């Protein structure tokens, strides 16, 4: 048997009023926040899914931020590559201009001074830093200045790495580039490759260049040149002048070889080489190359034209993988051309600048492709973000029509509970005693 007391009636009335008030406040909070789930207890399953979806949305947001950083880095790379490309294009135009046979030595010296300044401009771009002070062409060694030195003596201090930033679950986008990709791989030279010599290019490898001196008196053409156990690390990027000496036309002459650096300084490589007699060409070997020199027998008639005449000069260029080295060889031809014309250096430079431009354009295209990829990833991220927001909204957003209806209903329940409690709490047996 339930015992009824005034205290129990009072307690039940207050408790009922508080429950109705709590329901009213909960619905009111849903309306004010727009959220159906205010605490995990409101809907544990939906709350867990909202948390999971919100985490996925946060990852997409971080990737979007990373894409922005990646685009900034690639944009800087693209700008600097375009700057390098523009300078090389200008240098190539000046190279063509230098090949004009009407120039005086003074004119050539002016062109040389200009192109030396252009080299410094390229070197400055090679040492570009980003907004954080990191060198963009040093690979992983972002704090180390990648290039230093002077023309013909450039040293790279970076490595072969590419700094990356994650732009999707599986994609890491490069935001830097090793300088070697631009300047030390302007062309790929295989010293073991063999080609058939032609009259225009009498060498057995595309990296070798041979030119006849413009003032030669003999009728010998440019010399045939081949690689001979060449070391790609030490035997590339060279310029040689071969000189034929024959004081007495009735005796066989000798050959000497000098190497020229970017400032035109000479170093003797070989001296007093005498080819075999009897109509057999000789082979002069030095620094990983073999040069076939023609036989020059004494003339029967002093007036006869001979292959070689005392003082005849020949040039040999050995190209390098490095754009800087090939640039230095061209500068050498402008600095020292007293015994040969600049035509050989111009021909050598034009072909190698074309290789350098092709390499730069390839890298430029690669960056453009990467930026297109980040744009697609950014668009995909925006779509995913919208999808996640729809899922979260479906799970936790309040239905305003339903909530307003509940609010009106719960307010009525609260008012009824309050009125009932008031009536019951005023009941007292003594009110009926006279």
Image (tube, rainbow, N blue to C red):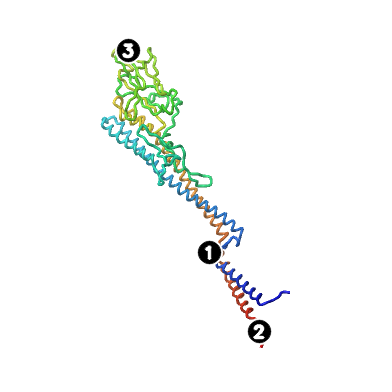
- Counting residues from the N terminus, which is met first, the one under dot 1 or under dot 3? 1
315 shown above or below 60? above
187 shown above or below 46? above
Question: Relative to residue 345, is residue 32 drawn left or right?
Answer: right
Q: Which residue is mark 3?
A: 251
Percent of width and height locating residue 61: 50, 52
Indicate the secondary structure of the residue bearing disc 2: helix
Q: CA distance from mark 1 to mark 3?
A: 108 Å
Q: CA distance from mark 1 to mark 2?
A: 50 Å
Q: Which residue is mark 1?
A: 33
Residue 44 visible in rendering:
yes
Q: Looking at the image, which is closer to me, 288 or 86?
A: 288
Q: Residues within 10 Å of mark 3 (few under 14, many from 20)?
A: few
Residue 217 figure quarter = top left
Could you say which disc has been placed on residue 67 in the image? Answer: none
Could you say which disc has been placed on residue 430 in the image? Answer: 2
Percent of width and height locating residue 218: 31, 19
Residue 110 figure quarter = top left
Residue 92 figure quarter = top left
Residue 197 visible in rendering:
no
């Amino acid at each position: 048997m339930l015992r009824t007391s005034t205290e129990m009636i009072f307690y039940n009335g207050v408790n009922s009023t508080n429950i109705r008030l709590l329901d009213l406040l909960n619905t009111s909070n849903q309306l004010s926040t727009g959220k159906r789930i205010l605490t995990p207890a409101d809907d544990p399953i939906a709350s867990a899914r909202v948390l999971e979806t919100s985490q996925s949305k946060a990852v997409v947001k971080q990737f979007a931020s990373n894409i922005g950083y990646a685009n900034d880095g690639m944009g800087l790379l693209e700008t600097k590559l375009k700057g390098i490309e523009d300078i090389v294009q200008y240098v190539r135009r000046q190279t063509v201009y230098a090949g004009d046979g009407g120039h005086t030595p003074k004119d050539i010296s002016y062109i040389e001074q200009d192109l030396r300044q252009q080299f410094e401009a390229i070197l400055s771009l090679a040492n570009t830093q980003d907004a954080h002070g990191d060198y963009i062409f040093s690979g992983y060694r972002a704090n180390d200045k990648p290039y230093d030195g002077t023309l013909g003596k450039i040293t790279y201090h970076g490595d072969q790495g590419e700094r990356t930033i994650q732009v999707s679950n599986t994609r890491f986008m490069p935001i830097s580039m090793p300088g070697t990709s631009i300047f030390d791989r302007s062309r790929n030279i295989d010293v073991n490759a063999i080609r058939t010599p032609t009259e225009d290019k009498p060498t057995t490898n595309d990296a070798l260049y041979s030119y006849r001196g413009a003032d030669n008196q003999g009728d010998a053409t440019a010399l045939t040149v081949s690689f001979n156990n060449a070391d790609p690390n030490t035997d590339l990027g060279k310029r040689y002048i071969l000189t034929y000496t024959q004081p007495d036309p009735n005796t066989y002459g000798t050959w000497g070889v000098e190497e020229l650096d970017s400032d035109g300084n000479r170093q003797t490589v070989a001296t007093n080489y005498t080819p075999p007699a009897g109509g057999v060409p000789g082979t002069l070997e030095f620094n990983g190359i073999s040069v076939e020199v023609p036989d020059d027998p004494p003339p029967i008639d002093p007036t006869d034209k001979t292959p070689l005449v005392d003082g005849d000069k020949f040039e040999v260029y050995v190209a390098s993988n490095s754009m800087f080295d090939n640039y230095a060889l061209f500068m050498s031809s402008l600095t020292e051309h007293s015994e040969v014309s600049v035509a050989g250096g111009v021909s050598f430079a034009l072909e190698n600048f074309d290789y350098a431009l092709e390499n730069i354009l390839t890298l430029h295209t690669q960056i453009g492709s990467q930026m297109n990829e980040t744009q697609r990833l950014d668009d995909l991220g925006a779509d995913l973000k919208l999808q996640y927001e729809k899922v979260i909204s479906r799970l936790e957003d309040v239905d305003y029509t339903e909530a307003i209806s509940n609010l009106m209903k719960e307010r009525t329940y609260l008012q009824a509970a309050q009125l009932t409690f008031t009536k019951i709490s005023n009941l007292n047996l003594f009110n009926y005693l006279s």
